[in-house]
Structures are given as structure tokens and as C-alpha cells.
Image: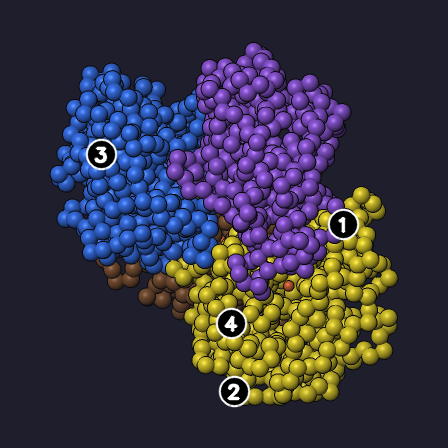
Chain colours: A brown, B blue, C purple, D yellow
Amino acid sequence: MSENTTNEIPKPEAPAPDILRCAYMELVVTDLAASRDFYVDLLGLHVTHEDDTQIYLRSFEEFIHHNLVLTKGPVAAAKAFAYRVRTPEDVDRAEAYYQELGCRTERRADGFVRGIGDSVRVEDPLGFPYEFFHEVEHVERLHMRYDIYSAGELVRLDHFNQVTPDVPRGRKYLEDLGFRVTEDIKDEAGTTYAAWMHRKGTVHDTALTGGNGPRMHHVAFSTHEKHNIIQICDKMGALRLSDRIERGPGRHGVSNAFYLYILDPDDHRIEIYTQDYYTGDPDNPVITWDVHDNQRRDWWGNPVVPSWYTEASLVLDLDGNPQQVIERTDDSEMAVTVGADGFSYTREKDETGTYRGEASKGFKLGNQV
Amino acid sequence: MSENTTNEIPKPEAPAPDILRCAYMELVVTDLAASRDFYVDLLGLHVTHEDDTQIYLRSFEEFIHHNLVLTKGPVAAAKAFAYRVRTPEDVDRAEAYYQELGCRTERRADGFVRGIGDSVRVEDPLGFPYEFFHEVEHVERLHMRYDIYSAGELVRLDHFNQVTPDVPRGRKYLEDLGFRVTEDIKDEAGTTYAAWMHRKGTVHDTALTGGNGPRMHHVAFSTHEKHNIIQICDKMGALRLSDRIERGPGRHGVSNAFYLYILDPDDHRIEIYTQDYYTGDPDNPVITWDVHDNQRRDWWGNPVVPSWYTEASLVLDLDGNPQQVIERTDDSEMAVTVGADGFSYTREKDETGTYRGEASKGFKLGNQV
Amino acid sequence: MSENTTNEIPKPEAPAPDILRCAYMELVVTDLAASRDFYVDLLGLHVTHEDDTQIYLRSFEEFIHHNLVLTKGPVAAAKAFAYRVRTPEDVDRAEAYYQELGCRTERRADGFVRGIGDSVRVEDPLGFPYEFFHEVEHVERLHMRYDIYSAGELVRLDHFNQVTPDVPRGRKYLEDLGFRVTEDIKDEAGTTYAAWMHRKGTVHDTALTGGNGPRMHHVAFSTHEKHNIIQICDKMGALRLSDRIERGPGRHGVSNAFYLYILDPDDHRIEIYTQDYYTGDPDNPVITWDVHDNQRRDWWGNPVVPSWYTEASLVLDLDGNPQQVIERTDDSEMAVTVGADGFSYTREKDETGTYRGEASKGFKLGNQV
Amino acid sequence: MSENTTNEIPKPEAPAPDILRCAYMELVVTDLAASRDFYVDLLGLHVTHEDDTQIYLRSFEEFIHHNLVLTKGPVAAAKAFAYRVRTPEDVDRAEAYYQELGCRTERRADGFVRGIGDSVRVEDPLGFPYEFFHEVEHVERLHMRYDIYSAGELVRLDHFNQVTPDVPRGRKYLEDLGFRVTEDIKDEAGTTYAAWMHRKGTVHDTALTGGNGPRMHHVAFSTHEKHNIIQICDKMGALRLSDRIERGPGRHGVSNAFYLYILDPDDHRIEIYTQDYYTGDPDNPVITWDVHDNQRRDWWGNPVVPSWYTEASLVLDLDGNPQQVIERTDDSEMAVTVGADGFSYTREKDETGTYRGEASKGFKLGNQV
Ligand SMILES: [Ca+2]
Ligand SMILES: [Fe+2]
Ligand SMILES: [Fe+2]
Ligand SMILES: [Fe+2]
Ligand SMILES: [Fe+2]
């Protein structure tokens, strides 16, 4: 059982870097023009720089160079999960920290991408390509540029979400790195299905979703209000892209945020997210959800589409090759909630609100996944 | 085929009454206290009058006595679909009109329910209990009572929706009665699956949904904004009633409205609805949707839950007995779109956005209905 | 006193045309490019046609050719207040109706502007250039084109507002023409300061504001939600055009709508408006507001800027010359509410909420108007 | 001139406490029942505890015991501006820090109010009663209790605002204490009119407003969306309390937040606030506004009501006596912007958007304050 894992990641003696926040993701996309249609024309992210191989994008309220880098490449994948750290010295700390962990690291004084200075990229113990940087080019913060504010405007990068087989193992590693857990999903036997953890005082900067990994589950941008998210759906309908709306919109149980999941041309999953809550106090209460609570992932009980559980993007090692995906051996959240052996309830101990062997609301999980 | 129906309802010589709008529905409920929890405590409708057997409810902006009457009874059913007519004489016209149609009618100078004066109820040619009235008690219009405005406030009664086997037959009858069609759903063979028709200048005062009938599919109330509907979902989640959210929220294709379907304690279906469009010009363009267009009922392509197609409330005859339900013989919308013999597309002629034998987005229609 | 006016406009024997709704306004503007910046770039109205002398604009949900015509000319003015009538024959009726009133009329089988067929323009008894038409070119209704939906999208033309010296005289004339009053502002002595009247089942298709006239006070477009109006303010701030926001945003007392008044480059006043209420029943209760009620024009008690009372656009006669402006002799709303001889109250009979000789909330009416 | 102030507050040798956030304010109110009407019935804050002399209130998303304490007393005043610190030891640090500053301090192991443990209150160098605490009783976080979510729900305490004569002096002291400035208002001569500074990663936890002080300018609660703030206005209108809306709603220039200022029964000013931006990076760009920029305090150019500049609440010393108010000797923001010697512009260097000797939009500053 994962809770008694023997392959625990030890805490380094070296101090952890002081991470401010998730800052940007670098995604490899296979068709830069198609991706531009999606991120710029559909979603309205703002171009800081673009050339034949890359597009640098930022959200409405951002003042650093970018929140997303699209890099043309042969295999769609996540190339970097980049965190900003408090000081230049924290980059040194990050490098030392991961070296002590025995991880491969690469330091570049001029950064791996435009707009970023001295940074270190690592292949972390879970197999994810993490980057830590402090130096960054400041660009125009567009936060009052209402003359270019779109009806579905994305205003901030909110968080990453990573798929990993052993959630407690990953959680322990990230807690050592300085993240604090705000919410998680468990069952009565103690299996952990997912955990959310933060640095910046919101519900999360990243989350771990139990599953075959390392893979990138999604990257999330936030809007000001709920109607902005509805507009993105409406616009996708108008563009006849409704089949690229994967799940939602809905209200999360976990995080209490209003959400939407959509798919980019390479099937990278993007979440649009708004209105979670302040978590910056050190004793912020952790909320543990029962995996069988049918409102944990959608407060309205709308079913989670199977692909949301099973599909995710590859991640790259520092050579640019896809990391090998390792199977989750713990129970699958989908199997324990909607499969023939699973069940979900609306009201604990109320059989009239309980689903066995099928999804809620008349939908049955098919073999089409 | 229904388009060549031999049992067409003839147009009376007598002039049709001048119908203003759908005004109220009378619903028989089996547990008045449970219904009060739903309509008053959850939905926040305003009580004009209540006693041991009935509750009279109105929406925030209404000035007539009520928009909904809940009457305690042994069998859950719709007892009256009541329309307000322009003048007292229009009640006479309605009576004569239905008598010429050979329908059973009942006239009551003091009304069938409180707050309503001279009215006529009829068993209409489709088997529905229709009422026509003009005289009505005025009550306080609460439209500026923001001191009692709830976060999910229902501000108007918007429309009825009726299930009937032969939609073209019903449509012709309602057009003769003065309704104008705004939108409908058809297939390439000419089968009509549903039609929306109005008197008051919105998309509809009532709609016909093809299916076994006569049955009451739903009654719809409107909110000011979309977030009010989201709040109703959030509140149902907080009350652990998410399993009573049947479908949505979503954006309709037909009508362009933002919608939600929920179920009352007797499984009467209530729609919450906002932001359709003005249709009051006589040449308002009719929009015909292809039944295979997967965005027709949900602009975001989210699947229609099977129960939404199959379940509906009984309707009563003038003696208070349930009307016999007659099976639809035309194709079923569910069968032609999601069943083994059906298909839906996101983009016409684009196979990558086409679903065959299954619902969209990874859900397969099960046998659990 | 105006209530006993001796110059009452007689009701014609001829039947009034059946007016559907306010349909479009033609405005003369002095700088077409500057107006285009305002109506197209800032407000996002959609261009149906444009050339060197005119721009035809429509709102998001409109299916007729236009809701606004901008015509280049030497003097900024309103050239036509155009109403759509139910049938082609209603244009004949309108012509006969105004001829019986002794008004100058002009009939053009091909219309006065593009997209409109047979129509009649009149110099009405109040001096306003009214147009009546039925035939109109249908264009694409954009109501589901969320791919071009802006954050401050204008979705419908809602109403006109006309300044006239003698409100009861004008009201009687418009009631004869078939309009129904929904709300008005009066004082205890019986003076009427303004009246709102409709055809289409909302609070108004046009309103009469007491003042020197005939002048065009404003034309109003509606949005879906309140945040759309806030976005227009935010955008005007970003464009450094905040001095073109004249009044609001706020909540009207009269009409209960959320509103904003802004000024175009020629000082034509545009209202942005949302969420009034249904008025289509013939016995819809009329709401009479006390002129001294400080919440009548702004429910939040925010002061009405003096220019809003005093400034308005000229209107043209059928030769294209400005109509002479006649002074109001009844009391001025501004004088009786905020001037040295006026007063306003928040709570009737509560001196602590009463303002004398000054505007509310610490602002005093200056001589700068 | 204040920038060269000779009475600079020296930075202590002792380390500053690690402040998490503004956490609660204690207000003395003269009529507890009237205050309850305002904070509970009107604003919907949630009661954690109440008795004959105090009411403890919290916002929707709060998990600590309270965000506001209303304490009955003879003179309306602010009794404590309370900050939560990261650890129990930070209370010791705070005590030592202020003792080194020569300030009067009082330590209470059981706290000064219910729900709070070990804390220290100080009379700070600017004369304000600051409290620092870590220990606090956790209570139910209501953040998903949508069953009690009101249409104008206040979800968080956002910030304090303090009036002090010498803003640079106060700013330097607060920067030493660990606050970081995000925005300020200055003129070309270097005078500072106001400064905003934070700990928790939003625009501010407190702000300094130049004026006669020490006084409490306002305390601010946030809502989820803009319509929640509009609802509060609408509700105050319905309760005929529009004269207690002092200023707004509007969009701030500084902070970019949507705002409203209202007055409680003792004239304590409450701001309702939503949607500022993330400021947690150490190099977050500081925005300096020109005091003559008419959009700095209202992005839409709506005038700031004079009382907003001149009125504020007394603050108490540790004996419960009002602190003496010292006059500002630097220029007054009101005088330099709207008075006879002041001016404001909409567009820098554009005379057509410039106001001299009067407020914008036709309102002149009167002597009625
Ligand atoms: Ca909204
Ligand atoms: Fe997420
Ligand atoms: Fe419906
Ligand atoms: Fe208006
Ligand atoms: Fe503030």
C-alpha cells in the first residue's frame, strides 16, 4: 500500500528554495499555427513574443515575460513546469537541493527560454521537468487595458496539475520542498487519490492526481468571474469546437472553484478556473474528501468524463525525450467510483442518492475509452 | 409519417382568443411540505397564499396573484396550463373555440383557483388541461424588493413545455390558436422532433417535445443573469441535493438561453432559464435545427441525460384523472442521436466530430433508464 | 398648468398603425470617422453597411438591417425616430393618421435609408421626425456568434427618449397612437416631469422627458448582464474617455434597469441599459414616482449630473433643418429637486434624509452648466 | 516638506514580526442593535458570537473566529487593527519591536477579545492601536455553504485604510515592519497623498491616506463578483438607505478593484471591494499615480464626494480614549484636485479633459461639508 511506501523520497539536508508561485509552463506542440488559433484567437492570451518555433504568452494581469511557452516539436509534451523563486540565491538552493536528491540538473545563466534569466531545470524524483528561476524580464502589465479585455479574458496563471502513480510519495516530496497541502481525496482504507498544494496562498500552485505518470494533467488559467468561463464555452460552440470541451463547466467540490476543462489541438488539457479561497495562513484547515462523495469533483454531481481520468500529456526529460510512464498500482479513482466495483453517493449513507456500477444521472461508463 | 397526418385538428371558424402569455401552472404534488421546501426554501419563490391543501407562488417581478399553484393530491401531475388572455371577452372566445373543436370545457365565473376570476378550462385536442383567464387579483410586484432578493432569484415565469406524440399535429393546432413558431428541430426526412412557439415576444410561451404524451415536460422560470442559475446549483450541492439536478447548467442551442433542469420532490421537472431573444416581429426568422446537430440542445455539446428524453409528468383531465399516455410513433430524438442507430455531429460532414452509437464525450447510453 | 392644456392634440378618427417596436434611429454626425471610433471600435456595434456618408449598425441579436444609421451632415441632430409596424398596411395607416393630424408627411416606396422599404416620415405634433415602416431587409442575426461577442456587447435597441416641453400633451398623443404608459414622475401639484411608454412589452419604446424641445434626449441599447455595462465604463477609462461618461452606472428607480449614459463625439447621448421588466399585460400597473423622491432616477441616490437635465440633441424637420426648440414652462425637474427652491428626500417625511438647496451626498449644483 | 521629515521613525534592531494578513478590526459602536441591523441584516456577515456588549462577525470564507468585533461603547471609534502573525513567537517579536520603538504595549495571554489567544496591542508610532496575534479559535469555514449565501455575500476581509498626516513617514515605518508598497499617489513636487501596502499578496492589507490623523478611514470586505456589490446598493435602495451609500460603486484606478463605500450607523466607513490583482512577487511593479489624474481614484472619472476626503473615525489608545487628531500640513488631495487652486485631467496635457476650480462632470465642490 502506498502509505507504507518503501521508496520514500528523503528530505535533503540542503534548504529548499523559497518558491513564490507557479509561473509558466513550456509545452511542446506539433502545429504552431493550430496552437496559435487556440491560445491566441480562441482564448485571447497575449503574445509577448513569437517566431517560427515559439510563441510566448501571458495573461491579462501578468507582469513577467510569459505564463506559457509554446515550442514547436515532434511530440506533444510538457517540457517544463516553471516556478519563480524569491531571490537569485534560491536558484542556487534549488540546484543544490535536487543534486542532493540525486536528480539530474541543468543550469543556464541565460535561461532556457526568452525573458528568463539564470535558471535551473531538473528531472525531479517523480520524473517531472521542474524549472526554478528568479530573474525575469518585466513586460507591460495589461491589468487595466480594458480596451483589449475580451469577454472570456484569462487574467492569471493559477496552477499546474501532475499525474503521478503514488500520490503520498509525491506529496511528501513536495511538502519537503515547501508546498502546503490544502485539500486531498482519500478513501476509508487510506488510499490517497489526489492532493492539492500551494505556495502563493490560493488552493494550489500544483496538484497531484493519482494515475499513470509522470504526465501533465492540465495547466489552469483563471478568469475574473464565472460568466467569463461561460463565454469561453459559448465561443467554442460558435466555432463548432464543442467537442474540445472535455468537462464542465461546473463547480468543483475540491477548491470550491468554478471550472472548465478544454483540449488544445495536441490534446493538452487546459483548465479555466475562478474563485477559490485564501489559504495563506499556516494552519489553514486541510479538507479531506471521501473518494465516494459524488460531489468531490463536481459539486453539482455531474459525471466526470472517463477521458479526464485516463488521458494526460507526456512530459520530457532534459534531453527532450518523453519520460517513461509508470502505472499506478493503487486503486483508480474512476474504478472505485463509477466502475462495476465502484460506487458514489450524494448523501452519505443515503441509498437513494447512491450509484453502484454506473455513473450518476443515467450515464453508464462504456468501453469506449 | 406525421407530416401527412390524417388526424389533423381543423381550424375553428370561431376566432381564437388573444393570448397574452403563459401565466401559471397548477401542479398536483403528493407532499405539500416537501414541495414547500423545494419551491420556497430552495428556489425562493414568493408565497402569495398558502393553506393545508395549496400553496400559491409568484416570481419576483410578477404582479398577478401567482405563477404556480401547488395542490396536494394523490397522484403527481399537471392539472392546468393557464394562459392569460387580453380581455374578459377572450375567455368567451376561448370557450367557443374549444367547443367548436369538440373539446370538453368547463367555465367557472369565480375561477378554479384563488386569485383568478372568470375562466375556462378545457381538455384540448392534444389531451392537455389548458386554462384561459383574464380577471386576476393584483398583488405587490416585488421587482424592487432587493431586500428579499436571493442569490438565485426567479424573476419571471418564462414558459411551459409539453410532450406530445405528433409534433406537427400539435404545432398546427397551436398556430391556429395564435402561437408563432420561433425554432424547431427536424431531420432530413422531415420528421419534427420539437417546436417552440410564443405569444409574448420571447422564444416561447410553450414548446412541444416529441414523445409519449400528453405529458408535462417542464415549466420554466427565468433569472436575471447566469450567475443566479449557477447559485441554484451551488445551493443544491450545499443541501446535498445534487442528484436532483438532472441536466445542465448549459447553453441551449435552441433559444440561445442559459439553462438548468432540476426535479422537484414529485419529479416534476423545473427549468431555470435566462437570456433568450426578442421574437415579437411577425417575420421573426424561424430557426430549424438538424436533429443530428450535437449543439442543438446543448451548445457546448454536453450530453442530454436519457431521463430528460423519457421522463415527464402526467397531466389531468377535468375530472382530475390522469390522461392516458399515447406512444410516439415517429422516430425518437434520443434514438436517432445517441442510440446504436443514431449519430450526432459537432461539425456537419466532419467525421472527427461525429459520434455513432454512443453519446459524445465518452459517455455511452446504458440500459439503466 | 399643463394638465389643463388648451392645445391638446385631438385623436384622429383614422385608426392608429399597429406599432411593433422602436426599430432604429438616424443620427446626423459631423465626423463620420470619429463616430465610427465610438460606435464600432468602442461600443462594438456591428456594421451592416458603410460608405463615405453613412454607417449602418445593428446590435448582436437584431435580424433587421440596422438599429442605427449614422449620416454625415453639417449639424449634429436626430433625423429619424423609426418604428416598425406590424404590416405593410400599417404604413398606410400611419400616413393617413398623421395627415388627419395635419402633420407634414413624406412617403417613400423605397425607404429613406438602405435596407428599409416602403415607409413614411412625418413631422409629428411634438415636432419630432417619426418614421413608420414594415418592409425591411433581413440580415444575419448574430445572436449565437459568440466568437465575435465583446465583453461589453450591445444586444438590442431598447428605447428612445425625447425631450418635450409639455409632457401630458405628448403623452396623450402617444397614448392615442397606441403606446401604453408604464411609469411616470409627478409632483403633488400634478405636474408631470416625465413618462415612459411602450409597445413591445418592456418598460418603454420611448419616453418623454420634460424640457425644452423637441430634442432627442438619448437612444438606448441593452446588454445581457450588468457586468457588460461595467466593462464599457472600464474600456472608456482605458481609452482615457472617462469624461465622456456622463452619468452612471447606476440602478434606475424608474424602470428598475441598470444604466449608463455616455456621450458620442457629437454629444449625442447613448444609454446602455439592462434588466427592466415585462409590461405586456394591458393592466400592467403604472408606477408613479414623486419628483422629490431622490431614488426615482437613481435608486442608490447618486446625483443626476446637471447636463443630463439640460443638454439634448436637436431634431430635424423633413427638409433636414433643425426644429425650433420651445421652452418648457412647467417646473423643471432639476429646479424642484436640487436647486435653491428644490428638495429631495431619501425617506419620505424623514428630515435626516432630506436635501434642500443642494444635491445629495455633498455635491452642490454649480453655475457651470 | 514631508519627504525630508526630521521626525522619521527609526527602524528597530529587533526583527519585525512576520505578519500574515490583516485579520480583524474592533470597532466601538454606540448602538449595538442598530449596528447589528447594518452588519448582519443588511450586509449578511455571519455571527460567530454575540452578547449584550459585543457581536463577533466573520465573512463567508473565513476560518478564524472573526473578522470584525463590534463593541458597545460611548464614542464611536476604531479600537484595534489586528494582524495575524505567522507563529506564536512573532507575537513576542512584535512586542519587542514596538518596545524598542518606545511605544506603549500591552500583552494579554488570553487575548483582548473572544476567540483570540496570546496577543499584544500597541499604540504605534502613528497613533494607531495595532494588535498582533497568532493563536485563534478555528470556526466553521462557510465557503461552500451556498444554502446561506446571500446575493451580496461578503467573502473575505480585504484591508484596512488609515488616515495619517505624513504619508512618507508612515510608509517608511510600515515598510520597516515588512509591508511592501504596491501603489501610491504623488504629485510632481514629490508630495505623497496616499500609499497602499500589503503582506498577503493582494494590493494591500492596509493603506495610508493623507489627512488629519490618526483616524480610521475604512475597513474593506470583498465579494466574489461585481454584481454582488451592485446588489448591496440595490438592497440599500430597497431599505431606503441610499443616503448611507457615500461613494460608488465604481472602478478604482489605484488597485483596479471594483468598489463601494457605505456608512454604518456610527459613520464608520465600510468598503466593499472585488478583483484586485496578485502582488506577491518581491519585484512586483509599484504603480505611482499622478494626483491630478482624474481616473486615479475612479477609473470612470466620477467625482470623489468631499466627505470621503474629510471624514473618518477616531481611533482609541490602549486606555480606550480617543487619540488626538493631528492636522496634515502637506497639501490636501481634495484641494489640489478639485478646489479653486486645484485641477484634474482626464488625458494628460489635453485641456479639453481638464477641470479647474470645479469637480468633473458638472459638479462643483460646495461649502456644505
Ligand atoms: Ca455576472
Ligand atoms: Fe486544476
Ligand atoms: Fe424549456
Ligand atoms: Fe432611457
Ligand atoms: Fe480601500
Are dots 4 and 3 on a single chain? no
Q: Nearer the viewer, mark 1 or mark 2?
A: 1
Name the front one of labels 4 and 3.
Answer: 3
* Mark 2 / mark 4, whichever is N-terminal: 4
Compute the Cα span from label 4 to label 1: 40 Å
Q: Which mark is residue A103?
A: none
> Label 2 vs label 4: CA separation?
26 Å
Given the image, on which type of amino acid does mark 3 rest? Val
Between circles 2 and 3, the one closer to the viewer is: 3
Query: Disc 1 marks which amino acid?
Result: Asn
Label 3 residue near ligand 3, CB within 8 Å: no
Percent coordinates x, y for residue D133 in the rendering: 57, 80
Query: Which of the 4 quarters of the picture holds residue B312?
Result: top left
What residue is shown with label 3?
B120
Residue C314 vertical placement versus D259 (above, below): above
For the residues labelled 1 and 3, the Cα–Cα distance comes to 63 Å
- Label 1 crowd bin: few (<14), some (14–19), many (20+), radius 10 Å: few
Q: Give neighbour class at mark 2: few <14, some 14-19, many 20+ (Cα, 10 Å).
A: few
Q: Amino acid at mark 4?
A: Ser
Residue B31: quarter of image:
bottom left
Residue toward you, A254 or D301: D301
The local secondary structure at tag 1 comes to: loop
Tell me the crowding category of disc 4: few under 14, some 14 to 19, or many 20 or more residues within 10 angstroms, Cα based: many
Is label 4 in a helix, a strand or a loop? helix
Q: Say which residue label 4 marks.
A: D35
